[in-house]
Image (cartoon, grey):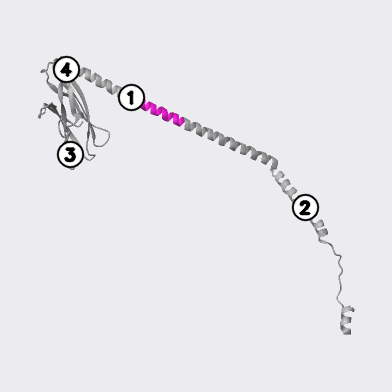
């Protein structure tokens, strides 16, 4: 017992350190100003370093604002230019379509003028010759391929000679020679000589005929024979053939 007391309170007892108690808010009140000062010093050093390197924040912000304004202006200008280009393209398309229509009309008129000149020369030669009274003839017979596959176009001019010819009433029939699947066959348009009003004839001096022929796309038309029937007759009055040009 005595030894314990001696060891605790005697010379060999451990030393006791007495420290003053400092409240936490006093510790923070001394630490926070130091931290703020350190951060301010670091920020000042950073800004000074940027200025020494030639970088000024205010100037950079101004340049950035100017660049943004330029981008906005260029974007607006680009949109306007795009709209102008689209408008010009539409105008060009309209002008091209108008030019194509004018060219088509000019071509049609030129073809009509050529046809009228040919008709004039033909009728001048026809009046200069003396044929048999009431004689029927097929002139200017042409057979051409149309734009679509299997479509053909036939043109001809029927003329009666004489000054006092009576009106001719009848019909015509087209007999087409066709090469199909390696075999040569014939097709009639129409099947009956007087069975289609489209093939009826009625004229006194002349009549112009234009007729379309429709065949299968894989069929090849070689020639067409034109047969002219007078009303009530079973045999054709005139036969004339033409090859595909």
Residue designated by label 1: 105
**Image coords of residue 118 (percent x, y):** 22, 20
Q: Helix, strand or loop at disc 2?
A: helix
Identify the residue shown where x is 83% and y is 59%: 26
Within 10 Å of the Cα at label 2, are there few (<14), some (14-19), or many (20+) other Cα atoms? few
Residue designated by label 3: 179
Within 10 Å of the Cα at label 3, are there few (<14), some (14-19), or many (20+) other Cα atoms? some
Q: Quadrant of residue 206?
A: top left
**Image coords of residue 205 (percent x, y):** 17, 19
Q: Helix, strand or loop at disc 3?
A: strand
CA distance separating discs 4 and 3: 37 Å
Vertical placement of 20 versus 63: above or below?
Answer: below
Q: Earlier in the sequence, mark 3 or mark 1?
A: 1
Magenta residues, start to end: 88-104
Q: Nearer the viewer, mark 2 or mark 4?
A: 4
The dot on residue 190 is none
Residue designated by label 2: 36
Residue designated by label 4: 126
Q: Helix, strand or loop at disc 1?
A: helix
The answer to whether residue 219 shows anywhere in this view is: yes
Q: Earlier in the sequence, mark 2 or mark 4?
A: 2
Vertical placement of 112 versus 177: above or below?
Answer: above
Q: Pointers 4 and 1 in contact (CB under 8 A)? A: no
Q: Pointers 4 and 3 in contact (CB under 8 A)? A: no
CA distance separating discs 2 and 1: 90 Å
Q: Nearer the viewer, mark 2 or mark 1?
A: 1
> Which residue occupies the foreground of this view, 219 or 195?
195
- Report the predominant secondary structure element of the magenta stretch: helix
Q: In the rendered image, which quarter contains the N terminus?
A: bottom right
Identify the residue shown where x is 30% and y is 24%: 108
Q: Earlier in the sequence, mark 2 or mark 3?
A: 2
Q: In the rendered image, which quarter contains the C terminus?
A: top left
């Amino acid at each position: 017992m005595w030894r314990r007391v001696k060891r605790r309170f005697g010379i060999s007892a451990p030393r006791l350190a007495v420290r003053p108690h400092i409240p936490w808010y006093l510790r923070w009140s001394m630490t926070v100003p130091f931290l703020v000062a350190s951060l301010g010093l670091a920020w000042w050093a950073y800004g000074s370093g940027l200025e020494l390197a030639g970088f000024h924040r205010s100037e950079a912000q101004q340049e950035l604002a100017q660049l943004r304004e330029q981008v906005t202006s260029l974007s607006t200008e680009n949109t306007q230019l795009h709209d102008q280009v689209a408008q010009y393209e539409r105008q060009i398309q309209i002008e091209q379509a108008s030019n194509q229509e004018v060219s088509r009309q000019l071509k049609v008129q030129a073809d009509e003028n050529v046809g009228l000149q040919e008709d004039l020369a033909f009728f001048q030669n026809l009046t200069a010759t003396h044929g048999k009274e009431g004689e029927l003839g097929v002139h200017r017979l042409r057979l051409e391929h149309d734009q679509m596959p299997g479509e053909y176009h036939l043109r001809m001019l029927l003329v009666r000679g004489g000054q006092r010819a009576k009106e001719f009433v009848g019909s015509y029939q087209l007999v087409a020679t066709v090469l199909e699947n390696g075999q040569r066959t014939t097709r009639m348009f129409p099947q009956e000589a007087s069975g289609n009003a489209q093939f009826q004839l009625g004229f006194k001096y002349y009549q112009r005929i234009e007729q379309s022929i429709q065949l299968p796309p894989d069929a090849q038309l070689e020639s067409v024979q034109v047969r002219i029937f007078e009303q009530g007759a079973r045999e054709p009055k005139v036969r004339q053939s033409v090859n595909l040009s």
